[in-house]
Image: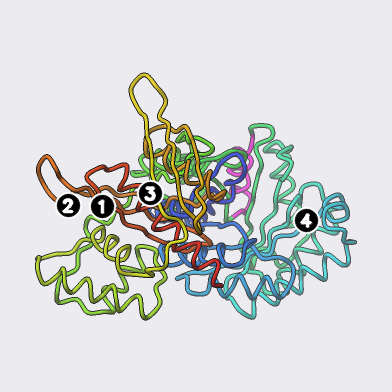
């Protein structure tokens, strides 16, 4: 049977209407890898530092799937993308370009011949760096057929191993799309030598049918989404190939036994309602309960776990964290990853405080909205913020954001008991992400709200200090 590759485009659907945090994107990639998709497609690099770190993190987390990232039609973008992607087990560079006259001239301001040259140059440049290069012909179904055949042939000659044609408008019916595919094979002689991919928008609610029909006439890769907005449904095509594989003489690598559980998890991540302003914009629960260190672990082992937790420590801070870890590990059998978070928060990157907590008043109850009034001191100037939130801690964090005028992604929030009894001390660890980098703060108090505020400000001060010294 022919193995049909499923290329998941779920990550590319994140935009203004759906906002996933950095941590959620890593978790999404892990879930897709477990599901057995052949390719995981990521968004292109727009903010160099943040997006490069995102791609590197996904590349490290994905064990089996190909990781594909699109490039712009220039050498700088190609090299920048490759530098972020090259450590992936199976990297792929994607050259995406429009081939319809409307998109070429009005969106990219290029004439057909100039676009052809840009495509062949980009594909050739990618092939010099990466063995797996894909050319994606956007809006292919509305292009001039002769020009499309010429572009696909040129991309194949330049080294592309996969060429994908897109029904961007989603206006074709299955019989029209299969006729379109047959014409490609009739007019592009080298097409059977590479993998033909298809991408169908769902404008007429026919995307799934068009994609499956294309498989019968030679398509070897389908772009689909585990949680779709305007794309082929991954669960649907996987079910069809599983049930009708013999008819199509085709199968795919999707693990159908775990498909519902994993797609439900992905749907939960996308559908979880979040307040637009809430600092709690992370829907992923940390899964570090099985990670432990002992007194026998050396600096490199500790640093590996610290890196896994998302920190990027200097040599000096790594040495401080290891020294604090040794002091604790000598007193107990195991040190968990969450305890290591607290160690990093208290030992690494200790900086002079820019913001100092003066006072806070928090009101909360089951019949009133939680409100917080905070006073922070900055350079002998008292700043105040008042905010309403979904709970006392949410309101307090929003009040801090109001004072500073900055919103940072809340990567993790932990509450731990330090002592027992009526006067028990509570410890909180807050992890904020700025510029793709994680900063953690720690707070201890008998009042867990106060401990949370102090932890947040502690992490905030580290961000502000680094931003001001760069």
Q: Which residue is mark 1?
A: 444
User: Which mark is nearer the camera, 3 or 2?
Assistant: 2
**In the rendered image, which quarter contains the C terminus?**
bottom right
How is the model colour-coded?
A: rainbow
Disc on the earlier residue, 2 or 1:
2
Do callouts 2 and 1 mark residues in contact (Cβ within 8 Å)?
yes
For the residues marked 3 and 2, what is the alpha-carbon distance in whole angstroms? 43 Å
Question: Disc 4 versus disc 2: distance between alpha carbons?
Answer: 59 Å
* Residue 16 marker: none
Q: Secondary structure at mark 1?
A: strand
The image position of residue 104, as x and y in percent, is 84, 56
* Residue interval drawn in magenta: 206-219
Query: Disc 1 versus disc 3: distance between alpha carbons?
Result: 45 Å
Q: SS of the residue at dot 3?
A: loop
Total number of numbered discs in the rendering? 4
Q: Quadrant of residue 111?
A: bottom right
Q: Mark 4 and 2 residues: CB-CB less than 8 Å, in contact? A: no
Give the residue at the far front of this rendering: 380
Q: Position of residue 416 (x, y in %)?
A: 22, 49
Task: Check residue 255 in the rendering and tell me which mark sits there, or answer none.
Answer: 3
**Nearest the eye: 5 or 320:** 320
For residue 59, side relative to residue 341 (left or right): right
Residue displayed at 11% across by 39% down: 422
User: Alpha carbon of mark 3 to alpha carbon of mark 4: how far?
Assistant: 33 Å
Tell which tag, 3 or 4, sits nearer the viewer: 4
Q: Which mark is residue 98?
A: 4
């Amino acid at each position: 049977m022919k193995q049909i590759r499923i290329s998941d485009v779920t990550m590319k659907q994140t935009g203004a209407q759906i906002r996933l945090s950095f941590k959620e994107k890593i978790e999404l990639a892990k879930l897709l890898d477990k599901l057995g998709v052949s390719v995981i497609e990521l968004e292109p690099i727009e903010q160099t530092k943040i997006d490069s770190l995102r791609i590197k993190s996904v590349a490290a987390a994905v064990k089996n799937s190909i990781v594909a990232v699109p490039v712009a039609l220039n050498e700088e973008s190609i090299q920048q993308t490759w530098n972020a992607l090259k450590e992936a087990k199976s990297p792929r560079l994607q050259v995406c370009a429009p081939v319809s006259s409307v998109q070429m001239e009005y969106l990219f301001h290029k004439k057909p011949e100039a676009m052809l040259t840009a495509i062949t140059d980009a594909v050739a440049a990618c092939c010099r760096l990466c063995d797996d290069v894909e050319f994606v012909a956007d809006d292919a179904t509305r292009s001039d057929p002769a020009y499309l055949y010429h572009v696909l042939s040129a991309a194949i000659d330049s080294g592309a191993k996969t060429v994908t044609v897109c029904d961007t408008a989603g206006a074709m019916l299955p019989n029209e799309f299969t006729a379109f595919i047959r014409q490609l094979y009739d007019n592009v002689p080298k097409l059977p030598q590479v993998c033909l991919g298809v991408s169908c928008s769902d404008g007429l609610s026919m995307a799934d049918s068009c994609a499956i029909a294309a498989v019968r006439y030679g398509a070897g890769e389908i772009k689909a989404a585990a949680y779709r907005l305007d794309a082929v449904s991954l669960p649907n095509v996987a079910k069809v190939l599983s049930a009708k594989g013999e008819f199509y003489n085709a199968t795919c690598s999707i693990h159908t036994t775990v498909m519902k559980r994993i797609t439900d998890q992905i749907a939960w991540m996308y559908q979880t309602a979040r307040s637009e302003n809430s600092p709690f914009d992370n829907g992923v629960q940390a899964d570090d309960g099985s990670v432990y260190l002992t007194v026998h672990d050396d600096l490199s082992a500790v640093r590996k776990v610290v890196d896994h937790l998302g920190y990027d420590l200097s040599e000096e801070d790594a040495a401080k964290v290891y020294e604090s870890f040794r002091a604790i590990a000598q007193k107990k059998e195991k040190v968990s990853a969450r305890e290591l978070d607290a160690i990093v928060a208290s030992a690494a990157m200790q900086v002079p405080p820019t913001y100092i907590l003066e006072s806070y008043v928090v009101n909360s109850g089951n019949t009133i909205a939680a409100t917080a009034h905070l006073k922070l001191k900055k350079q002998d100037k008292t700043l105040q913020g008042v905010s309403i939130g979904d709970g006392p801690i949410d309101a307090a964090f929003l009040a801090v954001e109001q004072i500073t005028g900055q919103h940072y992604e809340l990567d993790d929030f932990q509450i731990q008991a330090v002592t027992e009894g009526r006067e028990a001390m509570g410890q909180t660890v807050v992890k904020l992400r700025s510029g793709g980098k994680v900063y953690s703060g720690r707070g201890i108090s008998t009042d867990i709200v106060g401990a949370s505020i102090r932890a947040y400000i502690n992490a905030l001060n580290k961000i502000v200090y680094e931003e001001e010294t760069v």
